[in-house]
Amino acid sequence: MESTLAPFRILLVEDNPNDIEITRRALAKGQVKNELTVARDGQEALDILFGSRSETSLPGLILLDLNLPRVDGREVLSRIKGDPELRRIPVIVLTTSTREEDVVRSYDLGVNTFISKPVRFEDFIKVVTAIQEYWIVIATLPPATASGGVA
Amino acid sequence: MAETESRVKRMTYLEHAAAILERSRVSTTPVQQEPADESNGSSQTSSRATNKHPPASGDRVSVTLWERFDLFPFVTPNPRLVLALQSFAKGAGLAVSLAGALVLAGWALDLTVVKSISSGFVSMKPNVAMAFVLSGVTLHLLSTGPTNGHLRFVALASAFVVAVIGFLTLSEYLYGWNLNIDHLLFSEPAGALGTSAPARMAPTSALCLFLIGVSLLVLDVRRCYPVAQLLTILAALVSLTAFIGYVYGVGSLYAGGSSTAMALHSTLCFLLLSSGILLTRQDHGLLAIVTSDAAGGVMARRLLPAAILIPLLLGWVTVLDEEAGLHGPAFGVFLVVIWSIVSFAALTWWNSGSLYRLDVERQRAQDELNKGQAQLAEAQRIAHVGSAEWDIVTNAVTWSDEMFRVCGYEPGDVQPGYEVFLQRVHPDDRTQVEQNIARTLRSGDPFAFDYRIVRPDGAIRMAHGEGKVVHNDEGEPVRLLGTAQDITERKQIEYALRQNEMRTRSIIDTANDAFVAIDAGDVIKDWNPQAELTFGWKREEAVGRTLADTVIPPGHREAHLEGLHRFVLTGEGPMLNRRVELEGLHKDGHLFPIEMTISPIRWGRSHIFSAFVRDITERKQAEEALAHQTRELTRINSELEDFTHSVSHDLKEPLRGIEAFAGFIAEDYADKLDEQGQGYVNVLRESAVRMKDLIDDLLQLSRIGRTRLDQAPVGVSSLVQDVSLELSFALQEKRVELFIDPDMPTVPCDRARIREVFKNLISNAVKYNDKPQPKIEVGCRSDNRVFTFAVRDNGIGIAPEYYEKIFKIFQRLHHREEYEGTGVGLAICKKVVEAHGGRIWVESAPGEGTTFLFTIPRTAARQPGQEEQDGKYARAV
């Protein structure tokens, strides 16, 4: 399904350049037009989300790795979900960890989906496609975040 | 004199007894000796009733003859009466002597009143007077009791002279001789009144003198008492006849025809003398009965005087009556008859009454005695006490009925006897028994000892013997009394008790725990060797001290004493009968942890408290070390967990890069790569993916052992349905027909892990199947212990030699090209099942299919983490 709308804004918080490339590539293969912003660590992500909130539009979706330098992904998640506005943005944890406690903790903090990164690129594409499919096409999201405007 | 004799006799009996003991000691009582001993015994018992010497069996006839002469063997003289009679006899002797001397004096002074009492009477001849003096002296001497040789000789010589005087005078009369003995002392003018030859005594006097002389001579000759007494009685009768003649005025009675008459005072002297002689030996012969305390004696003493006096009196009255001419002679006879009837009837009636009462009393006494004896026998029977009596004097042995039974006989089975008894004594104990009894006989001290009895049937019984010697008034042993008590049962109980006690003692002494017992006053009563080691106090030191001051730390002493006090008062003991942990105080002053259980034992009206105490210093240290180790282990475990996660994370990230970028190469540079290059890139990507699978499986495997199972009831049917959904792609791809039993039970287990097991097993079943129509069945059966689950396929099967091997990690039976897989799946299954307390195995036939089976216990498996809680026990406050 080809979208004619403005590109969907996605924030990828990921420190591994390989994974950034893989994700970018997987997203590119999807049918949804998107604009990917990359934060290389937790602090950067927080800066983007909290600091420049008025200037730039907020992302419609956040892909968050857990193990990050400086500020941990869990901390980032906690801050996002603790914020009355940011909490509406769907956050998908995309991590190598399969640790049960990470899963549980993430959901406790209000994550919207927890996904383990598949090793096989084909599978990765499937995952990313499915994320786009679901969160951008199928799901109805609150207008503020969808439009990127401030309430 | 008699006493000396009997003492001599008894001494010989004692020697006899000692000889018996000696004899039985020498011979160990062989069996063949028994008949001889028994015959001996029987003669002993037969002689028992005689209270006399035990004769040799050849003397049996003479014994009975002697017995006949000892007429009244059992009479007991009345001592006061005896004394009185003895004095009478002495007095009579003296009186007769004086009378004789007086008459002799009368002859010397020619005093008629002395010689004849009255001129109308015959005079007492000087020889008679002389004889009276002598016989009076003899009687007096013999009545004075034991005399020395001289006096005895004087007495017997006098008696002899009296007998000779009588005998010679009698001879003169019989043969008409004149031996010129009549006026040896004094002469009498011829023609004296009533005198046939001058100065010659009357023949009756001569006879009496002879009889009395002989009787005095043989008075103390053994077995001659009746003879002497009969002679005396004869003399008394002769003189009585003369006396009656004087009293009744019948001359023929004292004069006896032409011969000289007996003088009046002679008759009196003779009567006095006779009485004295009879009474001085009243305890022997015919007279014994008269003086006895028995009913017979009483009767004799009542009747004899009457029998003598009443006829005398009646006759005298009759004579007086006749002389007075008041009535005719017939009346006199009537008087005698009627008074005899009345007086004797009255006397008989009176005595009958006495006899009747005596008899009734005797009967009652007999009944009492019988009753007492029956009671005694019964008591003996109950107590198993037999008694025996050995009359040392007669060597007679009597046994109570129970004595027979104690020895294993029925009463009367054997003749009781020392040898019979000794034969029943266990051979090993005989010497001891004999020595004990012999010592008692010698020393007179009582004996008491234990020994064994071998009954005739061979049964061995334990017996306790006690006994003593009974002495007579002179201090001579006369009887040996003994008892034998069967104490087998008691001994057995004692033995069992002792064994029990020894066993208990040895258990306590060898116990690995310290054993301490205290009484209600906190005083230590028992202290075993381990207690010595634990607390440092020796048993001798500890016993008698209070527990509080010995092993209880000062801070706890008050609480301890209070607790003890409270239990004694109220019976409440929160510390009792359970395991408590406390601190103990060692003798050297250091404190150490102890564990103990105190049990109160009721002891009479009080209590004993016993405790097993264990020094748990080492255990405490071990517990401490263990807790430390556990903490350490938990820490390491969690570190390891973190480590494996980072490892898997860090390992997988490059793998993902390899795979993805290899993919990018294949994609982006497809036109620049030839077919081989494309193939290499694919191998690169496949290797990365397999590496990732391997890491995942290893991670999972490592987690099973380290993390706790999350057990909860799981419906297995729905679980397997979930698995089938997860595997639906593979199932559909190979067109597998999967049958899942819908009625599988709900099982306590870790859902995720068991899911993994089913997933692995079903995946395997799908994977290792070459059939065009693969079939998989999942089912369950259960027994009362376990659920057994089965996953059956119709696949390639497994050869039996691989049944074990397949469960090992990285064991693959096939080339990777044939079937993909890491080789970890079954190892994971095995680990999960075993963590649940079950087991897993395989049943298969190559080419026909495989069935994997595993069990899950019905009750949840215990896990390392749970044990800590369950193992805790109540601690004392």
Image (cartoon, rainbow, N blue to C red):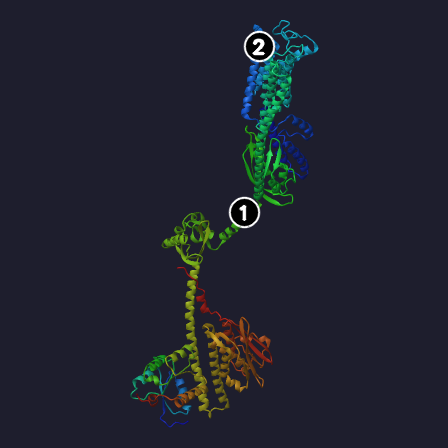
User: Are both tags, 2 and 1, on one chain?
Assistant: yes
User: Disc 2 or 1, which lies upstream in sequence?
Assistant: 2
Residue B691, compared with residue B678, is above or below; it is above
Residue B373, compared with residue B799, is above or below; it is above
Image quarter for residue B873? bottom left
Residue B12 horizontal/vertical position (percent): 61, 28
- The answer to whether one can see residue B464 in this image is no
Image quarter for residue B566? bottom left
Residue at (41, 75) in percent of width and height: B642
Q: Given contact means CB atoms under 8 Å apart, are the residues at marks 2 and 1 in contact? A: no
- Identify the secondary structure beneath mark 2: loop
Residue at (54, 25) in percent of width and height: B79
Residue nearest the observer in this picture, A124 or B228:
B228
The numbered mark 2 sits on a residue in which chain? B
Residue nearest the observer in this picture, B331 or B188:
B331
Residue B272 horizontal/vertical position (percent): 58, 17
Residue nearest the observer in this picture, B124 or B684:
B124
Residue B223 horizontal/vertical position (percent): 64, 23
Q: Residues within 10 Å of mark 1 (few under 14, many from 20)?
A: few
- Identify the secondary structure beneath mark 1: helix
The mark closer to the camera, 2 or 1, is: 2
- The answer to whether one can see residue B689 in this image is yes
Residue B761 horizontal/vertical position (percent): 53, 79
Q: Amino acid at mark 2?
A: Ile
Location of mark 1 (residue):
B494
Find the residue positioned furthest to the right: B175
Residue B599, compared with residue B109, is above or below; it is below
Location of mark 2 (residue):
B117
Number of numbered labels in the structure image: 2
